[in-house]
Amino acid sequence: VSEELLPPEELERRLQAIGEERYHVHHPFHALLHGGKLDKGQVQAWALNRYYYQASIPRKDAVLLARLPTPELRREWRRRLVDHDRDDVTSLRGLLPATRFAVDAYVAWVRDRSVLEAVASSLTEMFSPNIISQRVAGMLRNYDFVTPETLAYFTPRLTQAPQDVAFALDYVKRVPRSREEQEQVLGALRFKCDLLWAQLDALHFAYVAPGLPPPGAFRP
Amino acid sequence: VSEELLPPEELERRLQAIGEERYHVHHPFHALLHGGKLDKGQVQAWALNRYYYQASIPRKDAVLLARLPTPELRREWRRRLVDHDRDDVTSLRGLLPATRFAVDAYVAWVRDRSVLEAVASSLTEMFSPNIISQRVAGMLRNYDFVTPETLAYFTPRLTQAPQDVAFALDYVKRVPRSREEQEQVLGALRFKCDLLWAQLDALHFAYVAPGLPPPGAFRP
């Protein structure tokens, strides 16, 4: 790794390239889900496991909130916590262990890494409006058991995510003082893409092909 | 959950039952591996990912060693550290993210849970001589690129594991003072089985069926 600082626009270009290679919009399970190719049990398995990820976002944001050094930064992150923290608790019985391991790794990352890396790990929202609109439109069109209420979490994210990402992207372009810190930013986005991808791998393996839920997991 | 303390033999019987349901000896990838059904690239993928688990065992034992309250307990666990801590470091490039998430969850468990739960999570060694002898004998018979040296880590485990498990099993049968603590022991073994299983799920998905390594992972 060269020590030369990247121009902020080049850093942003490299973040984009990571998303183009690794974001879970490219996972075959996503295409099956929004394309209406899954049965109700498979969609239930997705919802159950997705819920654990979703329910952990406010945990993650609370951990980061506690670590942010200035009121300005904390106010920005407090808004995210409010956006995400809902109390429609569902049972986690039958959750895939792989979901838990991946999601818990995200919370641990935000707790144990630098604040810069913690903020940078939110940058998958650069790519999320696209996947969310595919998911919402496709699922409404293709599954008669899915209603707008079922997907109520996702719709406001279409407007919230761009606001969140504008802040975080500006932050990671502005704060790094060394190439090493810029590489940490890129590494944080790769890590986050990996953990989203791993969640769909586990769903695909358990419920699509070869279709082998691990012992104790939800069986449609 | 009833509050009545289980007789130690009943606790042991329930531990056995968890292994019979959940231990990764029942995973189809294990049968493919020792049955000679994998090609060299698939075995390399197994070795690469298995290495990360193996290399994390001394990290895990060091964390527990630091938390054990008496010299007797520390001496017992120190022996494990010596048994496992080898410095044949290999690159982790291409490691499956799911492997990292599962293995790191193990180290976090031993760090964050009670000492009783940490000790109990080692109880998969109740079942390991069987899987290790299947693995070693099968791989030597079925792959011309596998030699006894390749598998040198596993052979001493056949005699070490029973010694380790005798201590840990005695500990979890002797120490709990409530049914709740006994349930924690059973939960710890379930958790450990889950994380071993998740590692083979990830290998199977990436390298056998459907055979979709995630972005950035080793490709044979």
Image (cartoon, coloured by chain):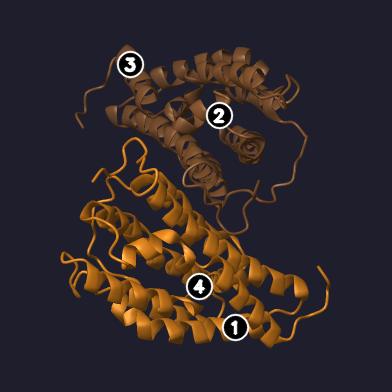
Chain colours: A orange, B brown
**A110 and B202: which is toward the camera:** B202
Q: CA distance from mark 4 to mark 3?
A: 46 Å
Residue at image location 71% in from the left, 25% down from the top? B146
Q: Which residue is mark 1?
A: A171
Q: Amino acid at mark 4?
A: Thr
Res A71 visible: no
10 Å neighbourhood of mark 2: few (<14), some, or many (≥20)?
A: some
Which numbered disc flags the more N-terminal residue, 3 or 2?
3
**B8 and A145: which is toward the camera:** A145
Is label 4 in a helix, a strand or a loop?
helix
Q: Are marks 3 and 2 in contact (CB under 8 Å)?
A: no
Q: Amino acid at mark 1?
A: Tyr
Q: Which residue is mark 4?
A: A124
Label 2: chain letter: B
Residue at image location 50% in from the left, 40% down from the top? B204
Q: CA distance from mark 1 to mark 2?
A: 50 Å
Q: CA distance from mark 1 to mark 4?
A: 14 Å
Q: CA distance from mark 3 to mark 1?
A: 55 Å
Q: Are the residues under badges 3 and 1 in a single subunit?
A: no
Q: Which mark is nearer the camera, 1 or 4?
A: 4
10 Å neighbourhood of mark 1: few (<14), some, or many (≥20)?
A: some
Q: Are marks 3 and 1 in contact (CB under 8 Å)?
A: no
Residue B28: quadrant of the picture = top left
Q: Amino acid at mark 3?
A: Arg
Locate residue B5 relative to residue B122 in the image: left or right.
left
Q: Which mark is residue B13?
A: 3
Is label 2 in a helix, a strand or a loop?
loop
Q: Which residue is mark 2?
A: B37
